Image: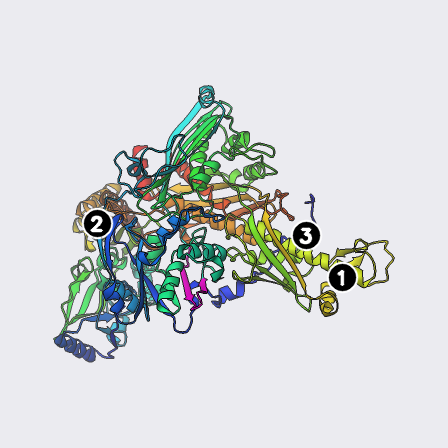
């Protein structure tokens, strides 16, 4: 690992100014939140930034609150803290589970959802859960702020939609209403300390009659980036999640999946597991609509 | 030994002497040592699985900032062929030297090509990038079939197969052939009511020790050298390093650190000769520490194996004939453990008609190293899978089938010697009565049974027992403590001397302080080094008796050692109070000097270790994922000196075997590059993957040891492969014959069921 400069601005204005200056000077800059991906990549020689900008002292990145009917999770909030936030635990059990799958307890003390998202691993566990729950990325730009749905934020293997000089500030999502539930499951050969072969997130909301009114299914590890499988969700709307509806959603997801074959599994295996997980995840989310989600 | 011994401390569970240092982080491991002025070394490794080295230019690297020395194969002497004695893996010194650093040719991706010593690790790594190596890539040989094919590329152009009835006509990748047999094979099969015939395959796996290889080497201007390193055997490091460097053994002192796991993988040298050669060239001490990636690419592994097995059974379950054709991958140099594999494959059973053929085959992968019961897990995976299938097809309980064929005391082992007292039958009977076996299975769960076996060895050991002036005891021995052996040595010394466990300290000493001892391996330390400690303690007792007799002006046969003191024999008319170790040590300056007991021996009579494992597994029919729901390891320990550490060995071996069965394997690209050289994608089991590993220790004393010990460290890894595979086969409803039982493989089998 080569030498680098480290700075930690303490306000949005200072962060923006430092980014602009670095851009002007052509400094290779890397934003640091928890560093659980960045430091490993630097040690492996995959990244060699000249300047590291730690954003943890910028208050907006440490936000963890309910603002009206919106949940806000600052980009540098430790995963462990986000997981323990009461609203996350109560109304987003699928997301909470996805967070809990990040590394180990020690890693969760450092890792952030924002960093996990910016790292844009196709197999990142929280990304499908964020997409399914309709999270938006709030981005600091040179001029102001902009927002982007998470599914539009991830653009490729390790690639995101941030332009030079931009920084992810926070993630925000609507607080779910009644008769709504989410779930996330991944498939790994081991129970822990592993990386998703397939990850599936779902958020379902029922109408008064118990019919699925909206369904968002997101898939991870079966394409260059996690994505919203719209056809899979559409296959569920208007149903009660009967076995045929689950089969249809699974088939749509398998159709949408574009996995590769690698050391973690063949394309065929991944597609097949994707179908199995969609059914299991939808069933779990559905159960949550009628139990804890139905408050 | 006597039938029923009344032990005072043996069999108790005191805290291990090295425990506090290890849990507080104070213990010093291989990478923890440093010296003033020390340089950091790094290794340039081959980017090809198989290539000729056309040229190496180190000029730019030598001129780089901070660089003090660069070495290549040209800096090392040519080492003559010669068998390595007493090591666990065996092998040849010339191959060892060729593996330490490549000369002329690289034989696997990761093979060391050059090494650099610089003032910082960053400088050393930067300098590696400046070394210019011109390669002529050659086709890589990555499987047994490819290696044995007619037109296979030759990994060693001079390799002539040994062990053939006629000398080999041309070089090949087949290093050696072993054959043994007895009886009339075809007559045996003709008699059979059932024949199981299958091919069983196991993958390349790594020992997975948590501590990467590390050492510090210091070459003196007087050509006396010192090495600090993590190893299973300082004396082996000394002899191997001296040989690779062309130096006399006496010019090298090796100081072993604490060791963070070895499992057989730390019975050889990789970095040590490089560190010393760099030190010689630079005039400075040099530290070298492998990364995890280097550990995967250049050390270990255990051989992948293909075993074609045929076993015949009578309708009442007696084995009528058995044949095994066993091919093991040696890696890039000869020396797979196919030899012990052939000796173990049918060892648990009485078989009149058998034939076994073993083949040691070169492939372009790292040179295989010993891994816990080397060669046996692959072999017994085949046999115990076939036994399970036979039990199923014959409608006989799998434990009962094994009882009908089990070897007993007095039987001749298929590899030659007659068995003394052994615990196979006792383990099988304990398994049949175990709650794990008698309780009903949950829905969908499959239950597997398998037998494990390992010879265990004796070899050479030394020990000294020093009685300090206050009567406390220092034991000096030369076997690095991997599994709690300091505690076992202290218990045996305390038992023999009749003193409290707490008054004994055990020192694992360096090669100039301890007497010679072979490697910590072969499950030999508690047995052989333990025997040396007992004999050295008895030497102390003899000296104490002699001194007391002289003090009491009587004959030595008028006194006896009892409860930690010399007493006049009952009925002997001597006015005397008993003399304890403390009394006699306190008077040492007035009567004969320090009390120092010694023993050195070549231990015979190692007792074979048998085990039986039970496994419950549940297969997810939609994903192929396996959950191990329950696991029980039952094993004959002879006598458990410290039962907790025996249980620890049983549990650790079970977990490593479960990993081997379920998910561990080297994944290679078509051009021979390992794609999963890290613990993320090389999947050893994590705690949440496992149930509690239940244990039951059986004690059939080994008459070859004063306290009945038989080795326990290796047998535990032998049975789990088949125990898991048999459970998975039962749950999946299809016979699984190729490991690992990863989800894609199980799902594929479910599709075909």
Q: Determine whether, in the image, residue B492 is placed left or right of residue A196.
A: right
Q: Earlier in the sequence, mark 1 or mark 2?
A: 2
Q: Which of B113 and A220 is in front in this view?
A: B113
Q: Which of marks 3 and 1 is in front?
A: 1
Q: Quadrant of residue B222?
A: bottom left
Q: Circle 3 is placed at which residue position?
A: B7
Q: What span is in magenta?
A: B209-228
Q: Position of residue B481 (x, y in %)?
A: 52, 57
Indicate whether residue B568 is drawn in magenta: no
Q: Where is residue B355 in the image (x, y as percent from the top left)?
A: 45, 29
Q: Which chain does tag 1 point to?
A: B
Q: Is mark 1 on a helix, strand or loop?
A: helix
Q: Position of residue B28 (x, y in %)?
A: 47, 66
Q: Which of B178 and A113 is in front in this view?
A: B178
Q: Circle 2 is placed at which residue position?
A: B136
Query: Does B507 sit above or below residue B174?
Result: below
Number of numbered callouts drawn: 3
Is label 3 on the same chain as label 1? yes
């Amino acid at each position: 690992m080569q030498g680098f400069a480290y700075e930690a601005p303490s306000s949005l204005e200072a962060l923006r100014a430092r980014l602009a200056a670095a851009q002007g000077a052509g400094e290779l800059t890397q934003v640091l939140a928890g560093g659980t991906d960045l430091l490993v990549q630097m040690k492996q020689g995959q990244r060699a930034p000249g300047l590291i900008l730690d954003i943890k002292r910028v208050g907006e990145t440490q936000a963890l609150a309910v603002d009206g009917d919106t949940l806000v999770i600052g980009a540098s909030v430790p995963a462990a803290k986000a997981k323990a936030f009461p609203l996350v635990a109560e109304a987003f059990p699928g997301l909470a589970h996805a967070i809990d799958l990040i590394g180990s307890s020690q890693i969760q003390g450092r890792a952030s959802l924002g960093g996990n998202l910016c790292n844009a691993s196709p197999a990142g566990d929280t990304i499908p859960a964020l997409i399914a729950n309709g999270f938006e990325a709030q981005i600091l730009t040179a001029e102001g702020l902009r927002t982007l749905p998470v599914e539009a934020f991830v653009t490729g293997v390790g690639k995101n939609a941030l332009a030079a000089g931009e920084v992810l500030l926070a993630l925000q999502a609507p607080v779910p209403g009644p008769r709504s539930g989410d779930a996330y499951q991944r498939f790994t050969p081991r129970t822990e300390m592993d990386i998703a072969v397939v990850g599936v997130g779902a958020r379902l909301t029922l109408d008064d009659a118990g019919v699925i009114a909206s369904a968002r299914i997101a898939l991870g590890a079966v394409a260059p980036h996690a994505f919203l499988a719209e056809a899979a969700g559409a296959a569920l709307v208007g149903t009660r999640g009967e076995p045929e509806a689950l089969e249809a959603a699974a088939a749509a997801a398998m159709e949408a999946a574009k996995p590769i074959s690698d050391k973690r599994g063949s394309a065929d295996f991944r597609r097949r597991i994707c179908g199995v997980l969609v059914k299991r995840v939808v069933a779990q989310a559905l159960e949550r609509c009628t139990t804890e989600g139905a408050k | 030994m006597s039938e029923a011994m009344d032990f005072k401390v043996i069999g108790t569970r005191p805290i291990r002497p090295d425990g506090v240092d290890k849990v507080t982080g104070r213990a010093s491991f291989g990478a923890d040592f440093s010296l003033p002025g020390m340089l950091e070394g790094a290794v340039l490794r081959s980017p090809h699985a198989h290539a000729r080295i056309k040229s190496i230019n180190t000029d730019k690297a030598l001129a780089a900032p901070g660089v003090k020395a660069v070495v290549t194969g040209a800096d090392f002497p040519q080492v003559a062929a010669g068998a390595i004695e007493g090591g666990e893996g065996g092998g040849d010194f010339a191959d060892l030297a060729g593996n330490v650093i490549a000369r002329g040719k690289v034989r696997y991706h990761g093979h060391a090509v050059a090494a650099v010593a610089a003032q910082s690790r960053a400088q050393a790594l930067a300098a590696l990038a400046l070394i210019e190596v011109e390669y002529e890539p050659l086709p890589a040989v990555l499987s047994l079939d490819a290696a044995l094919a007619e037109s296979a590329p030759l990994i060693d152009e001079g390799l002539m197969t040994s062990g053939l009835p006629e000398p080999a006509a041309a070089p090949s990748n087949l290093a050696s052939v072993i054959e043994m047999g007895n009886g009339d094979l075809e007559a045996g099969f003709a008699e059979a009511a059932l024949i199981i015939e299958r091919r069983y395959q196991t993958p390349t796996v790594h020992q997975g020790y948590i501590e990467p290889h590390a050492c510090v080497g210091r070459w003196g201007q007087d050509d006396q050298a010192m090495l600090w390193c993590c190893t299973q055997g300082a004396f082996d490091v000394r002899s191997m390093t001296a040989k690779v460097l062309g130096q006399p053994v006496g010019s090298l002192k090796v100081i072993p650190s604490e060791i963070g796991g070895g499992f057989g993988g730390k019975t050889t040298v990789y970095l040590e000769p490089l560190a010393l050669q760099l030190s010689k060239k630079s005039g400075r001490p040099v530290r070298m520490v492998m990364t995890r990636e280097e550990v995967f690419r250049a050390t270990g592994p255990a051989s992948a194996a293909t075993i074609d097995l045929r076993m015949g059974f009578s309708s009442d379950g007696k084995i009528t004939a058995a044949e095994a054709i066993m091919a093991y991958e040696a890696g890039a140099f000869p020396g797979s453990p196919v030899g012990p594999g052939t000796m173990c494959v049918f060892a648990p059973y009485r078989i009149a008609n058998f034939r076994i053929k073993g083949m040691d085959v070169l492939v372009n992968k790292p040179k295989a190293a010993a891994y816990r019961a080397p060669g046996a897990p692959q072999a017994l995976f085949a046999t115990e899978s076939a036994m399970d299938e036979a039990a199923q097809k014959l409608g006989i309980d799998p434990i009962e089938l094994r009882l009908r064929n089990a070897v007993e005391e007095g039987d001749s082992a298929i590899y030659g010697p007659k068995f003394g007292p052994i615990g196979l039958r006792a383990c099988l009977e304990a398994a049949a009565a175990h709650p794990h076996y008698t309780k009903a299975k949950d829905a969908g769960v499959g239950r597997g049974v398998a037998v494990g076996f390992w010879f265990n060895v004796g070899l050479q050991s030394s020990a000294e027992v020093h009685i300090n002036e206050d009567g406390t005891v220092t034991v000096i021995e030369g076997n690095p403590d991997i599994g709690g052996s300091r505690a076992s040595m202290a218990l045996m010394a305390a038992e023999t001397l009749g003193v409290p466990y707490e008054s004994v300290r055990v020192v694992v000493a360096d090669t100039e302080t301890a007497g010679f001892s072979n490697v910590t391996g072969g499950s030999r330390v508690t047995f052989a080094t333990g025997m040396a400690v007992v004999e050295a303690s008895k030497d102390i007792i003899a000296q104490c008796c002699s001194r007391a007799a002289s003090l009491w002006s009587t004959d030595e046969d008028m006194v006896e050692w009892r409860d930690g003191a010399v007493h006049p024999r009952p009925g002997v008319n001597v006015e005397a109070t008993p003399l304890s170790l403390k009394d006699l040590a306190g008077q040492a300056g007035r009567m004969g000097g320090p009390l120092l007991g010694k023993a050195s021996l070549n231990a015979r009579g190692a007792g074979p270790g048998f085990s039986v494992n039970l496994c419950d597994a549940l297969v997810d029919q939609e994903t192929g994922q396996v959950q191990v729901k329950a696991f029980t390891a039952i094993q004959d320990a002879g006598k458990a000196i410290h039962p907790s550490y025996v249980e620890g060995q049983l549990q650790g071996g079970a977990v490593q075997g479960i990993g081997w069965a379920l998910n561990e394997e080297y994944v290679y690209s078509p051009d021979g590059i390992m794609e999963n050289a890290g613990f993320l994608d090389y999947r050893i089991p994590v705690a949440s993957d496992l149930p509690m590993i239940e244990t039951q220790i059986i004690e059939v004393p080994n008459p070859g040891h004063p306290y009945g010990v038989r080795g326990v460290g290796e047998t535990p890894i032998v049975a789990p492969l088949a125990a898991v595979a048999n459970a998975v086969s039962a749950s999946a409803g299809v016979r699984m014959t190729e490991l690992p039982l990863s989800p894609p493989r199980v799902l594929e089998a479910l599709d075909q069921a």
